Amino acid sequence: MVETVLESKKNNFLWLDLVEPTEEELQDVAGRFGLHTTSLEDCLDPIHQPKFEKVQNTVFIILRAYDTRSRLQTDSIHKITRKLAIFLGNNFIITIHRSELDFVNELKDEWKNRCAGDEKSESNLIILLGLVKGAVYSYSLAFEKLEEAIEGYEGKIFTNDDTPVNIKEIHEFRSKVSAIRRVLRQLYDVILKIDDYTDEFAPVYQDIRERLERYLMLTDALREASNDILNTHISLASHRTNEVIRVLTIFSVFFLPLTFIVGIYGMNFKYMPELKTTYGYPVTWLVMVLITAGIYTWFKRRGWLK
């Protein structure tokens, strides 16, 4: 579908928005505005990464915005984000995307209202910055979900549950954070190249750049936090294992000499002198009690029963 968002005959300005366009529609638009064929091929590639290139007098940009419908466990860039292709000319801007993007629709409505009755308000550069800002700010929801998830992991890590944290979930979390960081890093490279065209809108550009830099630092913090949780989980699991081994060792130390004594006198040999003594049975019990008391006292003094 091809939508004419803005058209100013006075200023010879046009904004076209193509949502899930057919190849014929793309070819028609390319013919009208002289778009390069390689750029069109990139438009048709759903997994293309963010890029910036200038072909003759037209700037071609690919952005990737966060997909609000993506699952937390998803770690594929293609499934986490949605692509937005932009062609920027002297008197036109063309946006192309496969599905509806909320920030694009909001910007379209804003400019339709802004330019109603005022044809001097159009500017392809400020519209471009609005699109870039919308794509970058879309990741705020992603970080809200990621921070909520990391807080949940931190809350569960010290519970008494045998498996408080799912290792697979933490691995998927780290993979998603890494994927988002790669996209943000590529978006940052695109924004650095846009700088040459945005002198008159420096405050807007600087705000976008600072937000993106903050997101990049946040991804580093989230990766470090997930590593800390994983290491803590492994340490706690090792500690619990050591506690179990310690208890089993204590039990074995107590019962090993008793088992030895009982084993000897439980043998079915005919000639065992101790079996015929009058006080053999109580003496055996007394020896076992004394051994147990001695082991207990020894462990107690060394602090091994705490």
Image: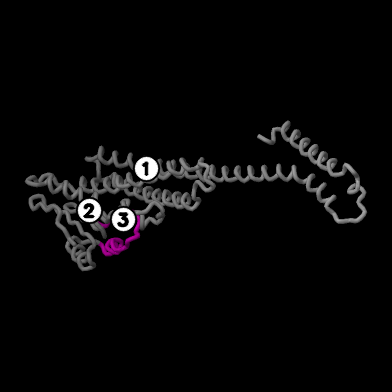
State how the image is colored: one colour
Magenta stretch contains residue 305: no
- Locate the N terminus and report the quarter of the image it occupies: bottom left
Instruction: Residue at 30% x, 56% y: name it.
Output: 83
| Residue nearer the viewer, 151 or 96 | 151
Circle 1 packing at 10 Å, graded few (<14), some (14-19), many (20+), is many
| Residue nearer the viewer, 146 or 277 | 277
Residue at mark 2 to residue at mark 3: CA–CA distance: 20 Å
In the image, is residue 208 above or below residue 30?
above
**Residue 82 image label:** 3
Q: Earlier in the sequence, mark 3 or mark 1?
A: 3
Report the residue marked by disc 1: 215
Q: Is residue 107 left or right of residue 249?
A: left
Q: Quadrant of residue 286?
A: top right
Question: Is residue 19 at all visible to an observer of this figure?
Answer: yes
Q: Are marks 3 and 1 in contact (CB under 8 Å)?
A: no
**Range of residues picked out in magenta:** 36-58
- Locate the C terminus and report the quarter of the image it occupies: top right
Magenta stretch contains residue 49: yes
In the image, is residue 239 above or below residue 266?
above
Residue type, label 3: Arg
Report the residue marked by disc 2: 88
As drawn, the residue found furthest toward the bottom would be 24
Q: Are marks 2 and 1 in contact (CB under 8 Å)?
A: no
Determine the secondary structure under disc 1. Answer: helix
